[in-house]
Amino acid sequence: MPSPLSEKQIVDIGKSNKRKYILEKFSARLFLFCALLSVISLLLIIGFVFYKGAHPFIAEGYSFIDFIFGMDWVPSEGKFGIFPMIVASIFATFGALIIGVPIGLFTAIFLAEIAPKTIAKLISPAVQLLAGIPSVLYGVFGLAIIVPFLQNNLGLAKGQSLLAVIIVLAIMMLPTIVTVAETAIRAVPKTYREGSLALGASQIGTIFKVVVPAAKSGIMAAIVLGLGRAIGETMAVILVAGNSLILPTSLTDSVRPLTTNIALEMGYAFGTHQEMLFATGIVLFSFILLLNFVLAKIGSKGGK
Amino acid sequence: MGFFRKTTIGLLVLSLAAVLTACGNNNENGKDSSNGSGGTISISGSTSVGPLAEKIADKYKEKNENVNIEVNQIGSSAGITNATSGVSEIGMSSRDLKEEEKVGLNETIVAYDGIVVVTHPTNNVKDLTMEQVKQIFTGEVTNWKQLGGDDMEIVVVSREDGSGSRDAFQEIVGYTSGELIRNSIVASGNGNIKTTVATNKHAVGFISFEYIDDTISTLKINGVEATAENVLQQKYSLSRPFLFVHKEENLSQAGQQFIDYILSPDGQAIVSEAGAIPVN
């Protein structure tokens, strides 16, 4: 049974409540500020890139069509065409997908469905560690191992090539694909597998006919995220791409994707040249936005 | 969405870092003017002038302990931009200034540099005419056989558009960026070119004298060896000035003293020690 409170105690409780109330308010405001900070920086970055990048087309009379479809990039002569780079970026990314998706998907299936716990415990951390390696180290690895390997074994004059980029990007996108796809596969209800096995299907049959289709939207998300990692990658690519300004026609051509064009020349660029690099950034940004949009679509489908 | 969130956070951290650095610079500049000959001198620009500036700065700091010198190697154009905007007190350039860059900037020639054409040590082509160099870099000649070497494809390695070394090289050899062979490898920085050439027996590139070592083979031009004496006697034609640029109103007393030091006999001795060519 509570003893009656004195007047002083009631005032004290009121005070401490008030203090609590102020602290609550303050915390809420602080968290809101932090949350807004990332939104603000996003808006600032977008605004800055678009402001800088759009300037030559609005104020200096350059044609955006010529920029996108132009074949020549000679900044010192005022020629800014990034078509070969767009093609290089797309080829490199999809090439990496062709190698990276099957390997990543099979790894995910192995980890989630087949592997004994002890082996899974060994492979899982290894895959995640792969994600933590700084990208420039992938580039150094590519330059020291993959480039000479291609050069010597394919009899090329130079190993810096589209193929080298594809291999490096495929390795880099593996952790993303494996982690997301594995989660999706594990989320498939156990009853699906039991039903399939009870009907006499084999384990592999069950995986490919029942489990993978059921995890389809998650696996698609894994692929799109891997794509996002590949298309935006810069430091690793700059070292193995060769950065030549040609429209790639074979896997052994050296290429310059959009990202490396920006990183390679930004340090030296000024005036229109610099703005055109920002414009290159806009094109890259559009690709990323498109991917994000696709991802959101997949996500909403998966929810149903 | 983890990937995109990570990217955003990364960008945020970067922008914060940028803001902080910018503030830092301002403070240091403020100190310069009040402390007279003490304080921090910020220097940025050419990757060709950079190693030389670092060496001179080290020696200078031994004698003047209250002076701190920061050298950032970010390329000639960026260095000139920084000197103009006041981000750096002094900009380093390894090429002559363009008309549009000259506004309000004072130039000081602190040294001369030679550019040398380099190949893989196993390449038996050791002497080229200027015309042949031009033919290689414009793609008229694509096999070492055509130059008296082995029957193998030539892989051209060039610096990126906007690099001071590239501008100077192209101007002296006599071709434009538009004429550069399209499938050339483009590498950023002298060191990068050296590594690329040192690891590919097909390759040919160009670097500053300072970067010469025995991982690459240096070529004679028109029969003249790439040496400092030949540059000073104007026999070797692939050479260019190293410039310090500054705005009069941004130059602190410490900065002026540093420039004076480079031009002094002591400073010029370091210049020749570093592999560049003294002005006198």
Image (tube, coloured by chain):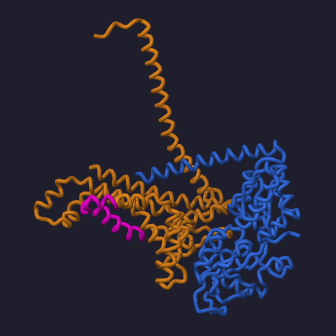
Q: Residue at position x 52%, y 73% from top?
A: A144
Which of the 4 quarters of the picture holds residue B165?
Answer: bottom right
Q: In the figure, is residue A283 to the left or right of A185? A: right
Which of the 4 quarters of the picture holds residue A8?
Answer: top left
Q: Give x and y (percent) for residue B38.
A: 81, 47
Q: In the figure, is residue A84 to the left or right of A173? A: right
Q: Give x and y (percent) for residue B229.
A: 84, 78
Q: Which of these two is toward me, B85 or A24? A: A24
Q: Which residues are magenta?
A: A94-122
Q: Give x and y (percent) for residue A67.
A: 57, 66
How many numbered marks are there?
A: 0
- Chain in blue colour: B
Residue A130: tell me if it is visible. Answer: yes
Q: Which of these two is toward me, A21 or B173? A: A21
Q: Residue at position x 88%, y 65% from top?
A: B265
Residue B103: tell me if it is visible. Answer: no
Q: Give x and y (percent) for residue A224.
A: 39, 60
Asked whether B239 falls inside the magenta stretch, the response is no
Q: Which of these two is toward me, B58 or B232? A: B58
Which of the 4 quarters of the picture holds residue B142?
Answer: bottom right
Residue closest to the far left: A199
Asked whether A114 falls inside the magenta stretch, the response is yes
- The image quadrant where one finds the N terminus of chain A is top left
Above-or-below relation of B36 to B77: above
Q: In the figure, is residue A110 to the left or right of B226? A: left
Looking at the magenta stretch, what is its main secondary structure?
Answer: helix
- Name the colour assigned to chain A in the rendering: orange
Q: Residue at position x 68%, y 67% from top?
A: B162
